[in-house]
Image (cartoon, rainbow, N blue to C red):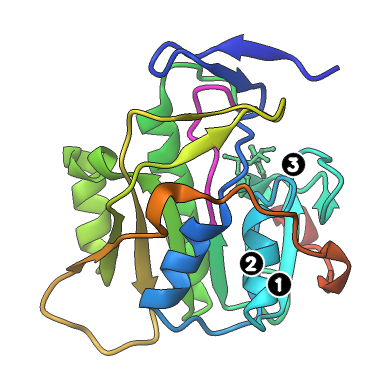
Protein backbone atom coordinates (compact mmCIF):
# COMPACT_ATOMS: atom_id res chain seq x y z
CA UNK A 1 0.00 0.00 0.00
CA UNK A 2 1.30 3.48 -0.89
CA UNK A 3 2.42 5.45 2.16
CA UNK A 4 1.14 9.01 2.40
CA UNK A 5 1.93 11.82 4.77
CA UNK A 6 0.12 15.11 5.35
CA UNK A 7 1.36 18.19 3.56
CA UNK A 8 0.88 21.34 5.54
CA UNK A 9 0.74 23.90 2.78
CA UNK A 10 -2.36 22.66 1.05
CA UNK A 11 -4.03 20.43 3.58
CA UNK A 12 -4.23 17.39 1.33
CA UNK A 13 -2.25 14.19 1.38
CA UNK A 14 1.04 13.95 -0.43
CA UNK A 15 2.26 10.64 -1.76
CA UNK A 16 5.64 9.51 -0.50
CA UNK A 17 8.25 10.12 -3.19
CA UNK A 18 6.63 13.38 -4.28
CA UNK A 19 4.36 11.72 -6.79
CA UNK A 20 1.87 13.99 -8.48
CA UNK A 21 0.47 13.39 -11.96
CA UNK A 22 0.56 16.52 -14.06
CA UNK A 23 -2.80 17.22 -15.75
CA UNK A 24 -2.53 17.07 -19.56
CA UNK A 25 -3.42 20.74 -20.10
CA UNK A 26 -0.26 21.80 -18.25
CA UNK A 27 2.00 20.05 -20.78
CA UNK A 28 -0.21 21.25 -23.62
CA UNK A 29 0.46 24.84 -22.45
CA UNK A 30 4.20 24.19 -22.77
CA UNK A 31 3.78 22.72 -26.25
CA UNK A 32 1.67 25.70 -27.32
CA UNK A 33 4.43 28.18 -26.42
CA UNK A 34 7.72 26.50 -27.41
CA UNK A 35 8.94 24.16 -30.14
CA UNK A 36 10.66 21.18 -28.57
CA UNK A 37 13.35 19.19 -30.32
CA UNK A 38 13.12 15.46 -29.70
CA UNK A 39 13.80 12.85 -28.62
CA UNK A 40 12.83 14.04 -25.16
CA UNK A 41 13.83 12.59 -21.78
CA UNK A 42 11.23 12.60 -18.94
CA UNK A 43 13.47 11.56 -16.01
CA UNK A 44 10.78 11.61 -13.26
CA UNK A 45 7.96 10.18 -15.33
CA UNK A 46 5.64 8.91 -12.59
CA UNK A 47 2.70 7.27 -14.32
CA UNK A 48 3.64 8.94 -17.61
CA UNK A 49 1.30 11.92 -17.45
CA UNK A 50 3.72 14.29 -19.19
CA UNK A 51 5.35 11.65 -21.40
CA UNK A 52 1.99 10.58 -22.85
CA UNK A 53 1.12 14.14 -23.90
CA UNK A 54 4.54 14.62 -25.50
CA UNK A 55 4.19 11.30 -27.33
CA UNK A 56 0.68 12.18 -28.50
CA UNK A 57 2.14 15.41 -29.91
CA UNK A 58 4.49 13.33 -32.08
CA UNK A 59 7.67 13.36 -29.99
CA UNK A 60 9.79 10.34 -29.19
CA UNK A 61 10.11 10.12 -25.41
CA UNK A 62 12.41 8.23 -23.07
CA UNK A 63 10.65 7.87 -19.71
CA UNK A 64 12.42 6.90 -16.47
CA UNK A 65 11.77 7.29 -12.73
CA UNK A 66 13.39 6.28 -9.48
CA UNK A 67 10.21 4.47 -8.45
CA UNK A 68 8.25 1.87 -10.33
CA UNK A 69 4.88 3.45 -11.09
CA UNK A 70 4.04 1.04 -13.90
CA UNK A 71 5.36 3.28 -16.64
CA UNK A 72 8.79 3.77 -18.27
CA UNK A 73 12.07 2.51 -16.85
CA UNK A 74 12.19 2.25 -13.05
CA UNK A 75 15.21 2.49 -10.75
CA UNK A 76 16.93 5.42 -12.48
CA UNK A 77 18.05 8.05 -9.96
CA UNK A 78 18.19 11.36 -11.81
CA UNK A 79 20.93 12.66 -9.51
CA UNK A 80 23.15 9.69 -10.40
CA UNK A 81 22.98 10.35 -14.15
CA UNK A 82 25.88 12.03 -15.88
CA UNK A 83 24.39 12.43 -19.36
CA UNK A 84 21.04 12.42 -21.10
CA UNK A 85 20.00 9.03 -22.51
CA UNK A 86 21.51 8.36 -25.92
CA UNK A 87 19.90 10.47 -28.63
CA UNK A 88 18.05 12.80 -26.25
CA UNK A 89 18.74 16.52 -26.24
CA UNK A 90 15.65 17.80 -24.46
CA UNK A 91 14.60 17.22 -20.85
CA UNK A 92 11.03 17.87 -19.70
CA UNK A 93 9.63 17.06 -16.27
CA UNK A 94 7.64 18.07 -13.25
CA UNK A 95 10.40 17.32 -10.74
CA UNK A 96 10.01 16.08 -7.17
CA UNK A 97 9.82 19.26 -5.09
CA UNK A 98 11.63 17.54 -2.28
CA UNK A 99 9.19 17.84 0.59
CA UNK A 100 7.99 14.26 0.24
CA UNK A 101 10.89 12.94 -1.77
CA UNK A 102 13.40 10.17 -1.76
CA UNK A 103 16.42 12.28 -1.00
CA UNK A 104 15.58 12.80 2.58
CA UNK A 105 15.41 16.52 3.26
CA UNK A 106 11.75 16.93 4.07
CA UNK A 107 10.76 20.59 4.39
CA UNK A 108 13.74 21.72 2.30
CA UNK A 109 11.87 21.78 -0.96
CA UNK A 110 13.38 25.04 -2.22
CA UNK A 111 16.94 23.74 -1.71
CA UNK A 112 16.11 20.34 -3.17
CA UNK A 113 14.60 21.96 -6.23
CA UNK A 114 17.71 24.11 -6.61
CA UNK A 115 19.89 20.97 -6.69
CA UNK A 116 17.58 19.29 -9.17
CA UNK A 117 17.51 22.34 -11.44
CA UNK A 118 21.28 22.76 -11.28
CA UNK A 119 21.82 19.14 -12.34
CA UNK A 120 19.20 19.38 -15.10
CA UNK A 121 20.86 22.54 -16.45
CA UNK A 122 24.26 20.79 -16.53
CA UNK A 123 22.90 17.82 -18.48
CA UNK A 124 20.91 19.92 -20.97
CA UNK A 125 23.76 22.39 -21.51
CA UNK A 126 26.23 19.54 -22.05
CA UNK A 127 23.89 18.15 -24.76
CA UNK A 128 23.36 21.64 -26.24
CA UNK A 129 19.71 20.85 -25.79
CA UNK A 130 16.55 22.20 -24.22
CA UNK A 131 15.16 22.02 -20.70
CA UNK A 132 11.62 22.60 -19.40
CA UNK A 133 10.83 22.21 -15.70
CA UNK A 134 7.48 22.77 -14.05
CA UNK A 135 8.07 24.79 -10.88
CA UNK A 136 6.14 26.89 -8.39
CA UNK A 137 6.10 30.42 -9.75
CA UNK A 138 7.12 31.94 -6.43
CA UNK A 139 10.18 29.68 -6.28
CA UNK A 140 11.97 31.49 -9.11
CA UNK A 141 12.05 34.69 -7.04
CA UNK A 142 14.47 33.23 -4.50
CA UNK A 143 17.91 34.87 -4.63
CA UNK A 144 19.94 31.71 -5.25
CA UNK A 145 17.42 30.42 -7.76
CA UNK A 146 17.36 33.74 -9.63
CA UNK A 147 21.15 33.68 -9.78
CA UNK A 148 21.20 30.11 -11.14
CA UNK A 149 18.55 30.86 -13.77
CA UNK A 150 20.29 34.08 -14.81
CA UNK A 151 23.70 32.40 -15.14
CA UNK A 152 22.11 29.62 -17.20
CA UNK A 153 20.48 32.22 -19.48
CA UNK A 154 16.93 31.05 -18.97
CA UNK A 155 15.01 31.65 -22.20
CA UNK A 156 11.48 32.09 -20.82
CA UNK A 157 9.07 31.46 -17.99
CA UNK A 158 5.72 30.18 -19.21
CA UNK A 159 3.36 31.15 -16.41
CA UNK A 160 0.12 29.22 -15.97
CA UNK A 161 -2.59 31.70 -15.14
CA UNK A 162 -4.79 28.91 -13.76
CA UNK A 163 -3.81 26.97 -10.69
CA UNK A 164 -3.31 23.25 -11.08
CA UNK A 165 -5.68 20.79 -9.49
CA UNK A 166 -3.63 17.85 -8.28
CA UNK A 167 -5.20 14.44 -8.13
CA UNK A 168 -4.61 12.46 -4.96
CA UNK A 169 -4.68 9.10 -6.78
CA UNK A 170 -7.79 8.19 -4.90
CA UNK A 171 -9.88 9.92 -7.55
CA UNK A 172 -10.33 13.22 -5.66
CA UNK A 173 -8.58 16.43 -6.59
CA UNK A 174 -7.93 19.76 -5.02
CA UNK A 175 -6.69 23.09 -6.33
CA UNK A 176 -3.29 23.88 -4.84
CA UNK A 177 -2.32 27.23 -3.38
CA UNK A 178 0.52 27.77 -5.81
CA UNK A 179 0.71 29.15 -9.28
CA UNK A 180 3.13 27.24 -11.49
CA UNK A 181 5.35 28.06 -14.44
CA UNK A 182 7.47 26.16 -16.92
CA UNK A 183 11.02 27.46 -16.85
CA UNK A 184 12.51 26.93 -20.30
CA UNK A 185 16.10 26.92 -21.56
CA UNK A 186 17.49 26.40 -25.05
CA UNK A 187 21.25 25.89 -24.99
CA UNK A 188 21.49 25.78 -28.80
CA UNK A 189 19.70 29.07 -29.39
CA UNK A 190 21.57 32.35 -29.89
CA UNK A 191 21.74 34.50 -26.74
CA UNK A 192 18.82 36.86 -26.13
CA UNK A 193 18.70 39.99 -23.99
CA UNK A 194 17.00 38.28 -21.05
CA UNK A 195 14.25 35.81 -20.28
CA UNK A 196 10.74 36.51 -21.49
CA UNK A 197 7.59 36.07 -19.46
CA UNK A 198 4.84 34.26 -21.35
CA UNK A 199 1.34 33.70 -19.97
CA UNK A 200 -0.60 30.55 -20.78
CA UNK A 201 -4.24 30.26 -19.78
CA UNK A 202 -5.00 26.58 -20.16
CA UNK A 203 -8.51 25.30 -20.70
CA UNK A 204 -11.60 26.96 -19.30
CA UNK A 205 -12.74 25.40 -16.06
CA UNK A 206 -9.76 23.00 -15.91
CA UNK A 207 -11.88 20.06 -17.00
CA UNK A 208 -8.85 17.85 -17.39
CA UNK A 209 -10.26 14.66 -15.92
CA UNK A 210 -9.88 12.93 -19.25
CA UNK A 211 -9.25 9.30 -20.05
CA UNK A 212 -5.57 8.28 -19.90
CA UNK A 213 -3.68 8.35 -23.18
CA UNK A 214 -2.40 5.10 -24.61
CA UNK A 215 1.05 4.39 -23.13
CA UNK A 216 1.81 1.55 -25.52
CA UNK A 217 2.94 4.03 -28.17
CA UNK A 218 5.81 5.19 -25.96
CA UNK A 219 9.22 3.98 -27.13
CA UNK A 220 11.67 3.22 -24.34
CA UNK A 221 15.33 3.52 -25.19
CA UNK A 222 18.35 2.59 -23.08
CA UNK A 223 19.04 3.90 -19.61
CA UNK A 224 20.92 7.17 -19.25
CA UNK A 225 24.59 6.75 -18.33
CA UNK A 226 25.73 7.23 -14.73
CA UNK A 227 29.08 8.09 -13.22
CA UNK A 228 29.55 4.36 -12.55
CA UNK A 229 29.71 3.79 -16.32
CA UNK A 230 32.84 5.98 -16.77
C1 LIG B 1 5.88 15.38 -8.91
S1 LIG B 1 6.01 13.70 -9.50
C2 LIG B 1 5.85 14.02 -11.24
C3 LIG B 1 5.56 12.81 -12.05
C4 LIG B 1 5.45 13.13 -13.56
N1 LIG B 1 6.65 13.85 -14.01
C5 LIG B 1 4.24 13.97 -13.82
O1 LIG B 1 4.41 15.19 -13.97
O2 LIG B 1 3.12 13.47 -13.86
C6 LIG B 1 7.79 13.45 -9.28
C7 LIG B 1 8.32 12.07 -9.65
O3 LIG B 1 9.73 12.09 -9.40
C8 LIG B 1 10.13 10.81 -8.99
N2 LIG B 1 11.42 10.94 -8.31
C9 LIG B 1 11.68 11.36 -7.05
N3 LIG B 1 13.01 11.38 -6.82
C10 LIG B 1 13.60 10.97 -7.99
C11 LIG B 1 14.96 10.77 -8.39
N4 LIG B 1 15.97 11.03 -7.54
N5 LIG B 1 15.21 10.34 -9.65
C12 LIG B 1 14.19 10.09 -10.50
N6 LIG B 1 12.88 10.25 -10.18
C13 LIG B 1 12.59 10.69 -8.93
C14 LIG B 1 8.99 10.32 -8.12
O4 LIG B 1 8.99 8.90 -8.06
C15 LIG B 1 7.77 10.90 -8.85
O5 LIG B 1 7.22 9.94 -9.73
201 left or right of 15 in image: left
Determine whether the beta carbon of the residue marked 3 sits less than 8 angstroms from the nearest atom of ligand 1: yes
Residue 41 at x, y = what percent? 65, 67
In the picture, which quadrant includes the C terminus?
bottom right
Q: Is residue 188 visible?
A: yes
Residue 53 is marked as: 2
Q: Which residues are magenta?
A: 93-101
Real-space CA distance between mark 1 and mark 2, rounded to the nearest whole angstrom: 10 Å
70 left or right of 7 in image: right
Determine whether the beta carbon of the residue marked 2 sits less than 8 angstroms from the nearest atom of ligand 1: no
Do the numbered discs 3 and 2 sit on residues whose CB atoms are within 8 Å?
no
Residue 70 at x, y = what percent? 87, 45
Residue at screen point 27% across, 90% down: 190
**Viewer-side residue, 171 vs 224:** 171
Q: Quadrant of ligand 1?
A: top right
Write down the residue under mark 1.
Answer: 61
Q: Main secondary structure of the magenta part?
A: loop
Is residue 160 part of the magenta span, yes or no? no
Residue 205 at x, y = what percent? 41, 49
Give SS at disc 2.
Answer: helix
How many residues crowd around disc 2 within 10 Å: few (fewer than 14), some, or many (20 or more)? many
Chain-order first, disc 1 or disc 3: 1
Q: Is residue 225 visible?
A: no
Residue at screen point 62% across, 43% down: 21
Write down the residue under mark 3.
Answer: 66
Amino acid sequence: MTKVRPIHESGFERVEGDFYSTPAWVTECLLSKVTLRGPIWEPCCGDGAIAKVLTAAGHQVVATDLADRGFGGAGVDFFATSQMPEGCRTLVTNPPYGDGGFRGRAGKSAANMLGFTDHAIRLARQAEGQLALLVRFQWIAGRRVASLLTDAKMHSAIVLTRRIRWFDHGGAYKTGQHHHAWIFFDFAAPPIGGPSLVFADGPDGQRHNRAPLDQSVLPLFGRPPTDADD
